[in-house]
Image (tube, rainbow, N blue to C red):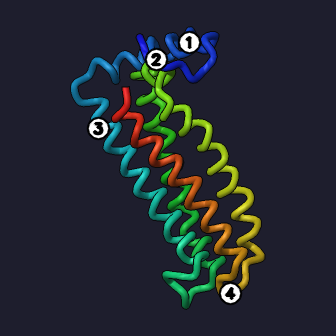
Amino acid sequence: MGGRQFAPEAWLPFFERMENTALGTVVRESIWAFPIIEAVHLLGLGLLGGAVLLADLRLWGTGLTRQPIASVVRHAHPWLVAGVALMFLTGVPLFLSEAVKCYYNTSFWVKMISLPFALGFTFGVRRWLVAAAPERADWRTRLIAFVSLGLWFTVAAAGRWIGFSA
């Protein structure tokens, strides 16, 4: 398999083993498994994206402005968790079905590197800062929203680009 190498060569055997798992083989060889799993993955993206947008637009000072910031973020949280869980549960079999392709795909690595930062920021930094958030948006809440949206946009854009790059 050609392509520009982003990851260390020593990792390639691991990716080959992952692709040769029973689940990877079933998803790859089935006519319907990959597209169905991908569709559910995109539903998870919709849940995740909707929850992030809802919370971050409120942090920015637009949307649901009559609701306290902490309340909007708290109510969006279960949808965020559901989206992350659904994307993880579907992302693993999608990865296993084409792990070697992912190994050579820069977009995959951008997603995998930015994902822990987005998760850490959302479930750590943003959650902690929102607990002390003012009733109205200010420069701090706008900064939180900007960073959060930037991180999640990077994850989503890189994830979508995986399918369009060789």
Q: Which residue is mark 2?
A: 100
For marks 4 and 2, the one nearer the N-term is 2
Q: Nearer the viewer, mark 2 or mark 3?
A: 2
* Residue 135, numbered label: 4
Q: Earlier in the sequence, mark 3 or mark 1?
A: 1
Q: Residue at x 54, y 54 (%)?
A: 152
Q: Quadrant of the C terminus?
A: top left
Pointer 3 and pointer 4: residues touching (CB < 8 Å)? no
Q: Residue 12 — which label?
A: 1
Classed neighbour count for the residue bearing mark 1: other residues with Cα under 10 Å, few (<14), some (14–19), many (≥20): some
Could you give the CA–CA distance between mark 4 and mark 1, rounded to whole angstroms?
50 Å
* Chain-order first, disc 2 or disc 3: 3
Q: CA distance from mark 3 to mark 1?
A: 27 Å
Distance in Å between CA atoms under marks 4 and 2:
48 Å
Q: Nearer the viewer, mark 4 or mark 2?
A: 2
Position of residue 123 relative to residue 58, above or below, is above
Q: Amino acid at mark 3?
A: Ile
Assess whether mark 1 and mark 2 are in contact (beta carbons under 8 angstroms). yes
- Tag 1: amino acid: Leu
Q: How far apart are the two marked residues, 2 and 1, measured between alpha carbons?
A: 7 Å
Callout 4 environment at 10 Å: few (<14), some (14 to 19), or many (20+)?
some
Amino acid at dot 4: Glu
Q: Residue at x 66, y 47 (%)?
A: 117
Identify the residue at image location x=48%, y=38%: 89
Where residue 70 appears, as percent x and y from the top left, is 66, 77
- Locate residue 78: give its quadrant: bottom right
Please state which amino acid type lies under the numbered disc 2.
Val
Residue underneath mark 3: 36
130 to 21, vertically: above or below:
below
